[in-house]
């Protein structure tokens, strides 16, 4: 969404878009100057705290999550999955079902 008062665009969750918002559409896109990310170790699930999806290093992320699951299971812990529509939209339903079985 473009802010007409400043030369900036902001990320706004689709559910919060209001009548009159200037939404960027089309194939041209806009140039984004992303701020530097802080370096250092972060929790494996920290990516879930972001409001908007971004490209993530999926293979590394998947390996980290798998390792966390193994560690929890080895301690006798249980894993809860709080799934959303992305599981179906990405075609991951059968994969999740196999993991659960």
Image (spheres, helix red, strand yellow):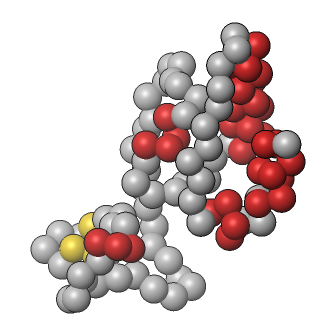
Q: Is residue 27 left or right of residue 58?
A: left
Q: Position of residue 95 (x, y in %)?
A: 83, 53
Residue at (68, 70) in percent of width and height: 89
Evaluate whether residue 40 shows in this view.
yes
Q: Is residue 93 left or right of residue 25?
A: right
Q: Position of residue 84 (x, y in %)?
A: 57, 59
Quarter of the rendering containing residue 61: top right
Q: Position of residue 64 (x, y in %)?
A: 70, 28
Q: Is residue 20 left or right of residue 80?
A: left
Q: Is residue 56 above or below residue 61?
A: below
Q: Is residue 98 above or below residue 43?
A: below
Quarter of the rendering containing residue 59: top right
Quarter of the rendering containing residue 75: top right
Residue at (45, 57) in percent of width and height: 52
Q: Is residue 83 above or below residue 21?
A: above
Evaluate whether residue 60 shows in this view.
no
| Quadrant of the snapshot with the C terminus | top right
Residue at (68, 42) in percent of width and height: 57
């Amino acid at each position: 969404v473009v802010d007409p008062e400043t030369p900036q665009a902001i990320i706004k969750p689709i559910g919060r878009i209001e009548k009159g918002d200037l939404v960027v559409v089309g194939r041209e896109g806009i140039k984004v100057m992303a701020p530097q990310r802080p370096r250092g170790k972060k929790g494996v699930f920290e990516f879930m705290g972001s409001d908007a999806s971004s490209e993530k290093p999926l293979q590394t992320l998947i390996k980290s999550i798998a390792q966390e699951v193994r560690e929890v299971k080895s301690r006798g812990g249980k894993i809860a999955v709080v799934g959303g529509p992305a599981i179906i939209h990405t075609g991951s339903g059968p994969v999740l079902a196999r993991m659960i079985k």
